[in-house]
C-alpha cells in the first residue's frame, strides 16, 4: 500500500499491518480519511486510485462560493469536479438536506460556464416521472408538465446565484430572472425520463434526482445513454423510495451502486444524516421520521 504526501507540514501515513487484525482493503475510487497517530486532530483526505492513496486535486475550488463542510461533501465535490473521462458516473446517497443536489448543480455549472466549458449543457431529470409511465394526463406541453416537478432544482439554482458575489441582483424578481436566463440560454435543461429512449448524450452533465424511484432496468437504460464527454450523476436517499414496488434493496440506485462498485469509472459517496446542512429541523426529521 502506497500513500503520497497528503499533509505538507508533516506526512500523515497509513500503516498496513499485514499480520495484524486490521488490514485495510480499499475499493478503487474510495475516499479515505487519514489521521495522524501522534496528533488525532491532524488529518488528510485522500482517494484510493487502485494502487495508492493520492491527494484530492480540486479541494481548493469553491463553485459559486459553495464550500463543502464535511468529509462527505468534500469527497462528493471532488468526484463531481473530476473530468468526465475519469469520473463519468457519480452515485451520491444521503438523507434530505445533505447537499447532494446543490453540490451537483454547483459543480456542473462551474464546469459548464468556466473558460474550458467541459459540457454543452446541464440536463436534469427527476425520477418522479419514469421511463415507462406517461404524463399525458397532465395539461400543457411536455415542459409545462414537468416544470412543477423541477421546482426543487430552481430552488437550488436560486441558492447558488444568491451565494455568488459575481451574479448580484437587486430583488427577488431579478433573482428569478437570472435563474430563468439559465434555462433560456440552454445552460440548464429539464426533460422527462421517457425522452431518453434511443438517445446518445454527448458532452453533457446529466443529473438524475430521486434516482431511488427508478427500477434497475431504467438505471441501466440511462447509464448506457452516455456518450463521450458525458457525466451521469445519480442522486438521492435509497431509504426514501416512493415507488410501491421498490424498497431500499431493490431500487435502481442501490442496484447501480452494487453493480458498479470497484469500477474505475464510478465514484460513490454516501452522506450521513449528521451532514445535513438544510437546518436543524431537517436533520432531526431525517433521523427520526
Image: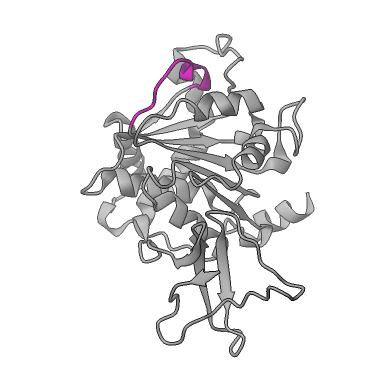
Dominant secondary structure of the magenta stretch? loop
**Display colour scheme:** one colour
Residue 124, percent across and down? 45, 33
Q: Give the quarter of the image for residue 78.
A: bottom left
Q: Give the quarter of the image for residue 217.
A: top right
**Of the pair 98 and 148, the residue shown nearer to us:** 98
Give the residue at x 75% y 29%: 246
Q: Is residue 155 above or below residue 244?
A: below
Q: Residue furthest top?
A: 136
Image: magenta residue range: 192-202
251 left or right of 111 in image: right
Give the residue at x 76% y 34%: 247
Residue 281, percent across and down? 67, 57
Residue 49, percent across and down? 49, 58
As for residue 130 lying within the magenta part, the answer is no
**Of the pair 88 and 117, the residue shown nearer to us:** 88
141 left or right of 176 in image: right
**Of the pair 255 and 13, the residue shown nearer to us:** 13
Count the numbered circles shown: 0
Tell me the quarter of the image containing the N terminus. bottom right
Q: Residue furthest left?
A: 115
Q: Is residue 236 above or below residue 33?
A: above
Give the residue at x 37% y 53%: 162
Residue 181, percent across and down? 29, 35
Q: Residue furthest front?
A: 19
Amino acid at each position: 500500500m502506497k500513500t503520497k504526501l497528503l499533509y505538507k507540514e508533516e506526512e500523515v501515513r497509513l500503516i498496513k499491518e499485514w499480520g495484524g487484525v486490521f488490514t485495510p482493503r480499499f475499493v478503487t475510487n474510495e475516499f479515505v480519511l487519514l489521521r495522524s497517530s501522534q496528533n488525532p486532530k491532524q488529518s488528510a483526505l485522500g482517494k484510493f486510485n487502485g494502487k495508492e492513496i493520492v491527494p484530492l486535486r480540486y479541494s481548493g475550488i469553491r463553485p459559486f462560493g459553495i464550500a463543502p463542510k464535511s468529509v462527505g461533501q468534500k469527497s462528493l465535490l471532488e468526484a463531481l469536479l473530476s473530468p468526465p473521462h475519469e469520473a463519468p458516473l457519480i452515485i451520491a446517497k444521503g438523507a434530505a438536506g445533505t447537499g447532494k443536489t446543490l453540490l451537483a448543480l454547483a459543480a456542473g455549472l462551474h464546469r459548464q460556464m468556466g473558460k474550458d466549458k467541459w459540457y454543452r449543457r446541464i440536463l436534469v431529470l427527476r425520477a418522479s416521472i419514469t421511463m415507462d409511465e406517461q404524463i399525458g394526463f397532465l395539461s400543457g406541453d411536455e415542459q409545462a408538465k414537468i416544470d412543477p416537478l423541477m421546482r426543487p432544482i430552481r430552488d437550488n439554482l436560486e441558492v447558488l446565484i444568491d451565494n455568488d458575489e459575481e451574479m448580484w441582483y437587486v430583488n427577488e424578481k431579478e433573482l428569478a430572472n437570472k435563474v430563468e436566463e439559465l434555462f433560456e440560454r440552454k445552460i440548464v435543461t429539464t426533460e422527462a425520463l421517457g425522452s431518453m429512449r434511443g438517445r446518445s448524450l454527448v458532452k453533457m452533465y446529466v443529473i438524475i434526482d430521486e434516482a431511488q424511484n427508478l427500477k434497475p432496468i431504467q438505471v441501466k437504460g440511462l447509464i448506457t445513454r452516455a456518450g463521450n464527454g458525458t457525466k451521469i450523476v445519480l442522486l438521492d436517499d435509497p431509504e426514501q423510495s416512493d415507488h410501491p414496488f421498490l424498497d431500499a434493496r431493490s431500487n435502481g440506485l442501490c442496484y447501480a451502486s452494487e453493480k458498479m462498485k470497484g469500477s474505475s469509472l464510478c465514484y460513490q459517496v454516501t452522506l450521513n444524516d449528521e451532514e445535513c446542512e438544510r437546518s436543524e429541523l431537517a436533520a432531526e426529521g431525517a433521523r427520526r421520521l
